[in-house]
Image (tube, helix red, strand yellow):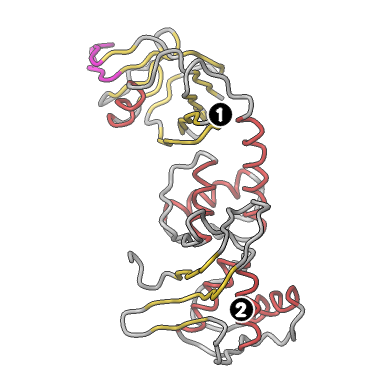
Amino acid sequence: MKNSNQVMIVLSLAMGITLGSTKQVHAQNLSIKTFKAQNQIIIDKNFSKVVKFGDRGDIVKQIQKALNLYSGAGLAEDEIYGKCTKEAVQSLQRKLHITEDGIFGPATAKGLLTYCRRSSVDENDGFTPLAKDIQNQIIDLGYNIKANGDLNSIDTVEAVKEIQEENNIKITGKVDKVFISKIQERIKIQSEEMKNFKSDTNYYILVNSSDHVCVVYEKTQHLWKQIRTFNIMSFSNLEKGTYKMGIKGKKLSLNYIDVSYFTQINGLDTFYYAKESIDFGLRISKQDAEFINELPTKTTIKVF
């Protein structure tokens, strides 16, 4: 485990769902476990502790973490059971129609586990935390981050802030209900757009000229799946439009600059790798340039 404080979900499921799916889930023996080097705190159906306003410590942090992950509370995980934590507990209690006292005890723990059953799990019996699913959806929107299950990782926080700014949401870097609702809305729109993908090959390339991000899709069984996302290091006046991949090569010299793995987009505009910009097309990393260079000609490239 990369992070010893990371909340892990242990689920035994008859069926799994992905966030936004309409499939029903039947969960058994559901528990949330937090592992530490010399201590283990378990929030499960047998939870017997009573944690309330004014309490402090690791168990408070785990409650805050669980509330953030499974009810979008947006709490600071500061180990202090303060006003915001109490209000988040009350909000959950209100939703679950249990005594609204702001105290995290056995009844609330059981209610939280019930709430978890409506959370996202993967297709492999539910062993992927909701945090990783959220990161995968951010990736699906074209952001180049790692799906490591840590919503506090630097790249994830920066992507969250960027999405919040683009959608006029309060910029906090925290994932909450408003944020999740917004990315679900954008994914729905994007899914509709993907239905209109047309390419002479089984690949489709989207170039985001504003964010300088490139996303590559592959069609399998009549469905388009994102297979690669990468950043564009230099973007040189490439007009928005739809193009077909053209001439490719391994070595070229333009403007006295050595270019490797160039792939034509239109005219002199190419995907390419070089140590500096040649003032044409899109300069990308050597690894990404090699990848693009291997794709078949006539692949559609849409610049927007």
**Among all residues in the image, which is located at the extreme top?**
267
Residue at the (54%, 74%) spot, across then down: 30
Magenta span: 250-261
Q: Residues within 10 Å of mark 2 (few under 14, many from 20)?
A: many
Work out whether mark 1 precedes mark 2 in sequence or the reverse, and give the earlier one. Answer: 2
Quarter of the picture holding the N terminus: bottom left
Quarter of the image for the C terminus: give it: top right
Residue 260 in the figure: left or right of residue 139:
left
| Of residues 68 and 236, the one drawn nearer to the viewer in this rendering | 68
Check residue 252 for magenta coloring: yes
Label at residue 222: 1
Q: Residue at x 41, y 50 (%)?
A: 146
Magenta segment's dominant SS is: strand
Q: Nearer the viewer, residue 239 or 123?
A: 123
State the image coordinates of residue 98 (x, y, percent, origin top left). Answer: 74, 83
Residue 47 placed where, x, y %? 55, 87
Q: Give SS at disc 1.
A: loop
What's the CA distance linking mark 1 and mark 2?
46 Å
Q: Amino acid at mark 2?
A: Thr
The image quadrant of residue 195 is top right
- Residue type indicated by callout 1: His
Q: Secondary structure at mark 2?
A: helix
Instruction: Name which residue lies at 48% across and 84% down.
Output: 59
Residue 144 occupies quadrant: top left
Residue 85: numbered disc:
2
Q: Which residue is at the front of the view, 241 or 27?
A: 27
